[in-house]
């Protein structure tokens, strides 16, 4: 397969992994037994409350309503605590994946393709910035793999952010 196609595939793989791995980790860690226990208890109390006549057993109905309200408040507090924890985990995970991706990409490009010329281009296409298009190669009128790979990474990032 062509080096151009491989660079596009690797760029999109990097961006999708940076997007989906933190979500997967949060989903895996978000299986919270206490949250599920509170939800089940609220559901049981609501079912019990629906079987009670409010006119005949007002005190019992009100007592159940107070317990349901208390459990709902506890659930809201638990959700707030979990959301701040999830935000921290997501941030750390994303930053570590970005760092890993950058280091891996730099090593990959530097050791394999840092002087590779992909295409011969007319010299007047990128006239003011032709040195950037050919860097680190010194051949005039060429496009280097480093330039192409950085462009595909930028396009993959913009595309995956707009899709997801």
Image (cartoon, grey):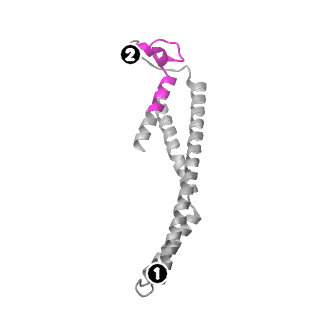
Q: Does the rendering let one see residue 39?
A: no
Q: Residues within 10 Å of mark 1 (few under 14, many from 20)?
A: some
Mark 1: secondary structure: helix
Q: Where residue 117 sits in the image (x, y, percent)?
A: 50, 19
Q: Where residue 78 sits in the image (x, y, percent)?
A: 56, 61
- Residue 140 falls inside the magenta stretch: yes
Q: Main secondary structure of the magenta part?
A: helix
| In front of the other: 93 or 124 | 93
Q: Does the rendering let one see residue 15?
A: yes
Q: Residue at x 58, y 29 (%)?
A: 106
Q: Where residue 108 sits in the image (x, y, percent)?
A: 58, 30
Q: Tell me the residue that label 1 is attached to.
A: 61
Closer to the chain start, of discs 2 and 1, is 1
| In front of the other: 136 or 154 | 154
Q: Residue at x 41, y 37 (%)?
A: 159
Q: Quadrant of the C terminus?
A: top left
Q: Residue at x 38, y 12 (%)?
A: 124
The span picked out in magenta is 127-154
Is 114 drawn above or below residue 57 in the view shown? above
Farthest residue toward the bottom?
56
Q: Residue at x 46, y 36 (%)?
A: 157
Q: Tell me the residue that label 2 is attached to.
A: 125
2 vs 1, front mark: 1
Mark 2: secondary structure: loop
Q: Which mark is residue 39?
A: none
Q: Where residue 140 sits in the image (x, y, percent)?
A: 47, 11
């Amino acid at each position: 397969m062509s080096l151009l196609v491989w660079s596009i595939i690797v760029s999109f793989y990097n961006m999708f992994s940076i997007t989906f791995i933190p979500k997967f980790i949060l989903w895996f860690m978000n299986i919270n037994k206490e949250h599920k226990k509170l939800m089940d208890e609220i559901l049981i109390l609501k079912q019990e409350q629906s079987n009670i006549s409010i006119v005949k057993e007002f005190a019992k109905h009100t007592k159940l309503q107070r317990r349901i309200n208390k459990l709902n408040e506890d659930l809201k507090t638990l959700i707030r605590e979990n959301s701040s924890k999830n935000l921290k985990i997501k941030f750390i995970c994303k930053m570590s994946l970005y760092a890993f991706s950058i280091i891996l990409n730099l090593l990959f490009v530097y050791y394999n393709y840092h002087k590779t010329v992909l295409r011969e281009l007319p010299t007047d296409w990128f006239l003011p910035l032709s040195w950037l298009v050919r860097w680190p190669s010194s051949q005039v009128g060429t496009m280097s793999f480093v330039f192409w790979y950085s462009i595909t990474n930028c396009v993959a990032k913009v595309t995956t952010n707009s899709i997801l």
